[in-house]
Every structure is written in C-alpha cells, then in structure tokens.
Amino acid sequence: LRNSFETKAVKQNINTVAMQPKVQASFKVAVLGAGGGIGQPLALLVKMSPLVGHLNLYDIANVKGVAADLSHCNTPSEVLPFTGPEQLGDALKGVDVVVIPAGVPRKPGMTRDDLFNINAGIVKTLVEAVADNCPDAFIHIISNPVNSTVPIAAEVLKQKGVYNPKKLFGVTTLDVVRANTFVAQKKGLRLIDVDVPVIGGHAGITILPLLSKTKPAVSFTNEEIKELTVRIQNAGTEVVEAKAGAGSATLSMAYAAARFVESSLRALDGDSDVYECSFVQSELSELPFFASRVKLGKNGIEAFVNSDLQGLTDYESAALEALKPELKSSIEKGVAFANKQP
Ligand code: NAD
Ligand code: LMR
C-alpha cells in the first residue's frame, strides 16, 4: 500500500509525458458509514489508492463535507457523497467493493455483543441494499459484533437469492495488524517481516493468534505466548479504555480496513498472490463461519490456507476448542435475528 502511494506521488511530481503512470485499473469502492470515526480516515486511505477510480461515501449524517474535503486531494478517484436511505441505492450501483463500518462503537465496560441490538438492524438494512444494487461486489463487514453481523449479512443475501460466500468477508485484519505489531515489539523483529495468522472470530477469546505459525519462525516462552495472546485478544478493549467513552479503535481500524480493501482490489486486478485473514463461511472447523487465512482472487475466496490449522501447539488446540461455544452462539444469534419475522 505504502509503496504504491510513494511511487504514484513521485510520478506525479515529475510532469513529463514519458513519466506518466501506466493506466491503472479503476475500481469503484463504496464506504457505508463514511462520516464516522472509522469511515473518515478509511475514506482518506482509499482515496490514496491508485486502483480506485470512484469512491462513493454514504452515511445518514455528516458525509457531504467529508466528500467535499476529500475531493480536493489530487489522487485519481472521483469522490461523491450520498446521504439518507433514498440515496443508498445510487451509492451502491456498479460498486466492486463495499465496506461497512456503519454502527455504534463500544464504551468502557461493554462487550461487542452489547452492540448487537443497534448494529444488527443497521447491517441488515444496508446489506439488503447491497443485494439489490451490487450483488456481485466484495462485501467487507466491519460493524460489530462481527461474529454475528457476518452471519446476518449471509442470511439477508440468501433471502435475496444473491449469496456468494466467496465474496462476504468479516474484517479481522486489525487482529493481524495488532499481532504483527506486538510480536515484532516483543521479539525485536523488523515489522515488515512479521506475519501472524489470526483465526476464529473477532471478540475476546474467539480471537486466536497462531503464534506457532509466526513468520519468520520465532520461539516464544510459555509466558510470552500467554501474555501476547491475551494482549491481542484484549487490544480492542485496551483502546476503548484509553479513549474513555469517546469510542473504540478508529485510526488503526481504518489502516487495517484500507489494507483489506487494497488486497481485494489487487485480487480483482488479477494479482495471484494475495492472502488475508478474514471471518468467512468456512469448512475448516465444524462452525459455519470461521476466520482463517484465505487466498483472494478475481472471484473472491479462491482457497483456504488449511495448513495453518495443522500441527497446532497444545495451547493453541485448547484455545481453539475453548472458543467454539462462544463463536457458535454468536453465529446462531445472527442467523436467528435475520430470520425472525418482522
Ligand atoms: P462512529 O460512531 O464513529 O461512526 C459510525 C458511523 O455510522 C456514523 O457516522 C453514523 O452516522 C453511521 N451510521 C449509523 N447508522 C447508519 C446507517 N443506518 N447507515 C449509514 N451510516 C450509519 O463509529 P466507529 O468508531 O466508526 O465504529 C463503527 C463500527 O465499527 C462499530 O460497530 C465498531 O464496533 C466497529 N469496529 C469494528 C472493528 C473490527 O475490527 N471489525 C474495529 C473497530 C470498530
Ligand atoms: C476492535 O477490535 O478494536 C474493535 O472490534 C472495536 C472494539 O469494540 O473493540
């Protein structure tokens, strides 16, 4: 991501025909909830992508100014604001990737599941519009509780007859970003080299970093494993408490979401070497949805990285079994919500 921005900036400064950038793909991205704490910095990062030609910003409030502001950045994409349910369909027409950070964030003392009553309905309504207007898009769900909102989205898409499990993603990239950061700090590694797969779901103990699969190979003491695992699982709460009532992670989340958008666009653009962790419909465990590393391609998920789940340590195996009941019940709660009669 960073390299492509730097390359583009250098090319733009040298104003000669010979140095014009080669024609880039021009994808259309929509952010639903674009006026919020995540939505605004995410929109800025997506605006910087050379792969984006159109950036549609939708929110029920505050989005006109955000779009006007961003539209002055001299990067290729055209930015348009959409607000209110009557403009939602237009925001989604022809979109390749739709990102959904709409909804309320946690305050100290709350679990992600405490957001269910408000955010479940928001996600349901927005995904209904996605189904009607851009059913073929990659759908990135950020709104919490992800362990329930992704199953809700799947049920809505099924009801509309357009569900493609290869294109529905719960965004868990922030868990990987955190794991990479904390492991690099702890072991004195170069950040750019570190990659830790994170599996399971996106809440508390359902977040399971596979430290034994860290690249580059690195050894940890039992104490380090426990300390790092707990820190990665509680990192969202660490931010919620530090913000002391002003919300949850927004800037690191925008960074992580922009990485997942860029990976999706690269895959759509034909790059055959794109891997990300995500909470998706899966057969890797007995649960219908499960976060793991997946290979992305033009048609969405091309493959699951099964090898991550082989040869787990005793600690990881026990943690994997321990997370299943909570994850199962969060998935079932989402499915039941989406199927209840109005
Ligand atoms: P925020 O309150 O700052 O912003 C949310 C935005 O959503 C607001 O602008 C609001 O107007 C908008 N919104 C509300 N209802 C809407 C609707 N029906 N249609 C369109 N827009 C609507 O919150 P935030 O900090 O940006 O967090 C958003 C969500 O992301 C929360 O649910 C939070 O828990 C979640 N989150 C997830 C992760 C993750 O890793 N998946 C990380 C951080 C936050
Ligand atoms: C996070 O992991 O930061 C998000 O899920 C927000 C939260 O409520 O912790």
Image: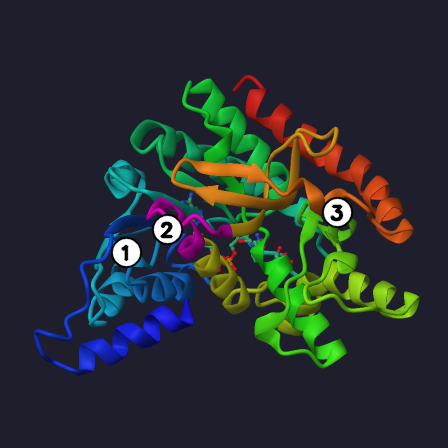
Decide which of tag 3 and tag 2 comes sooner along the chain: 3
Q: Does the magenta portion include 25?
A: no
The residue pinned by badge 2 equals 265
Q: Which residues are magenta?
A: 261-274
The amino acid marked with disc number 1 is Val
Relative placement, left or right, of 341 versus 200 is left
Tell me the distance, in whole angstroms, between the alpha carbons under discs 2 and 1.
Answer: 8 Å
Relative placement, left or right, of 112 versus 88 is right
Tell me the distance, in whole angstroms, between the alpha carbons under discs 3 and 2.
Answer: 28 Å
The amino acid marked with disc number 2 is Leu
Q: Residue 101: x, y in percent?
A: 47, 51
- Above or below residue 13? Residue 341 is above
Q: Residue 152: x, y in percent?
A: 55, 31
Label 1 crowd bin: few (<14), some (14–19), many (20+), radius 10 Å: many
Tell me the distance, in whole angstroms, between the alpha carbons under discs 1 and 3.
Answer: 33 Å
The residue pinned by badge 3 equals 206
The reply to whether callout 1 and callout 3 are in contact (CB within 8 Å) is no
Circle 3 or circle 2, nearest the eye: 2
The reply to whether callout 2 and callout 1 are in contact (CB within 8 Å) is yes
Label 2 crowd bin: few (<14), some (14–19), many (20+), radius 10 Å: many
Specify the quadrant of the image occupied by residue 3.
bottom left
Q: Give the SS element for disc 3.
A: helix
Ligand 2 shown in quarter: bottom right
The amino acid marked with disc number 3 is Thr
Residue 52 numbered mark, or none? 1
Q: Residue 338: x, y in percent?
A: 56, 25
- Above or below residue 190? Residue 330 is above
Q: Give the SS element for disc 1.
A: strand
Seen at 40% across and 57% down, the residue is 262
